[in-house]
Structures are given as structure tokens and as C-alpha cells.
Image (cartoon, helix red, strand yellow):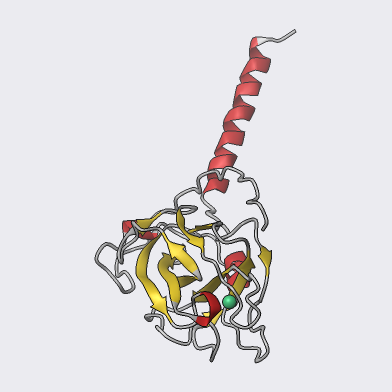
Amino acid sequence: MITASSRLIGCLVLLLSSVGVAVEGQQSKFVQPCPDAGGYRGWLGGPAKNHLGHDYRTPAGTDVKAISDGVVWRVDLNVPGFGSEGKPGALIWLKHRLASGHYFYALYGHVTPDRKLRDGTRVEVNQTIATVAVYLDADTKKDLSHLHFGIWNSETMPPVSQLGYGPVRSFTDPVKFLKENAPYSDVNSEVEGDSGPSPRPEAPVRPLKPVAPRPLPPRR
Ligand SMILES: [Zn+2]
């Protein structure tokens, strides 16, 4: 038989567990830019062991997600080597921020950017910012479509060349970085018209919105 006191205890348990959820929600985690993709070429992989990012192998047309709230630093449609068969192609640089207040930049390459994106456009975590572009190998014409994902772990401006392979400089292993650097904070409350580190105090951390599961795109 349910008594008034057992109902009260039940309510207290519910209340405490909801407080627990709220505290947990402050730990905003990064999302993967292509959650369902396999790996292709990893950090410092390739023949010369100088690949400056992680490749997410996935069919052309797959959505590319913003890993956290951020702002578009640069959309470039004509970067040498970023297109199919060795031609120029597109990339997006987003500026993100950790809860510590440290800014960094994420590179999303071999993509077809969302046409609404402009330099300075604000984006939300898990927002589709692009789709993976068709990427055929220059020699074999084999379909190797993938997202090239890089992290420039510095508040200095990212470079505009030698983005896929080359000296490490401030690039870092992006998979390790996403695992080890949660939570991030809401960059959007701070960076309007600002391209450098914010002098203002750290913004409160915003809980991550739940992510709906997405069916795998058909393989070609
Ligand atoms: Zn790559």
C-alpha cells in the first residue's frame, strides 16, 4: 500500500536524480563531425607520416556536423588539393572554445559547404555545416570520399596553406583532442565581431542538446 510518506520519499528521489542530471548536463561533450563514418587516414599517417588530421571515410553527401557551438572563421571554396582528382576544393574553418576559455580552430575539408555559411556565421553544436564532397583518387579514379578533419590548437590564426600534409606547427591529433578536452563552452556568447581571444570572463557552459540517431547513408 502506498502511503503519503512513501510518495514523499519517491518525490525526493526524483528531485535528487533530476539535480544529478542537471549537474551532468554541464559537461558539454563534443560531437563527432561524421558520427557514422569509418576511419581512413589517421593523424601523422600517409607515406611521409605527415597527415595533419583524421579522415572520416564516408560516402559523398554525408552530413558534416559542427563539433560544438562556434563561429565560421573562413569558408574557402578553392584550396589546392582539397578537390576531387587533385583539383582545388572546399574547406570550412570553425572557431570553437573550450570551457577553460581557450580558443581553437577546426578544419572540415573535402566538403560542399552549406550555402548559408559566411565568414562570421554562428553555428550550433551538431548543426549540419556541409556535406562530404566527391573525392576521386587522381590516378586510380577510385572513390575515396571522406571528411578531412583537423584541429589547430592555438588562438593564433590558422594557416591558409599546407593544411593536409606538412609540418605539425599547432595542428594536433583531432581524435585525441576531442576525447580529452570536453567540456567546451558556448563560443557564440562571446565572439561577435571578434577574431581573437576574448578578454571577457568565461561564459557559463551550456548543456548539450540530445542528438537524434541518424540512419547510415547507403554505401555506393
Ligand atoms: Zn586527410
Q: Residue 105: horizontal and vertical position, in percent?
A: 44, 72
In the picture shown, does residue 8 fall above or below 93?
above
Out of 73 and 6, give the one closest to the viewer: 73
116 left or right, relative to 56: left
Residue furthest top in the image: 1
In the picture shown, does residue 79 fall above or below 9?
below
Q: Residue 165: horizontal and vertical position, in percent?
A: 55, 86
Q: Residue 142: horizontal and vertical position, in percent?
A: 65, 73
Out of 196 and 132, give the one closest to the viewer: 132
Q: Quadrant of the N terminus?
A: top right
Residue at image coords 61%, 72%: 55
Q: Quadrant of residue 113?
A: bottom left
Residue at image coords 37%, 80%: 157
69 left or right, relative to 132: left
In the picture shown, does residue 54 fall above or below 60?
below
Say how many tags the image has. Answer: 0
Out of 30 and 100, give the one closest to the viewer: 30
Q: Quadrant of residue 202?
A: bottom left
From this viewpoint, is residue 129 visible?
yes
From this viewpoint, is residue 102 visible?
no
Q: Residue 207: horizontal and vertical position, in percent?
A: 49, 48
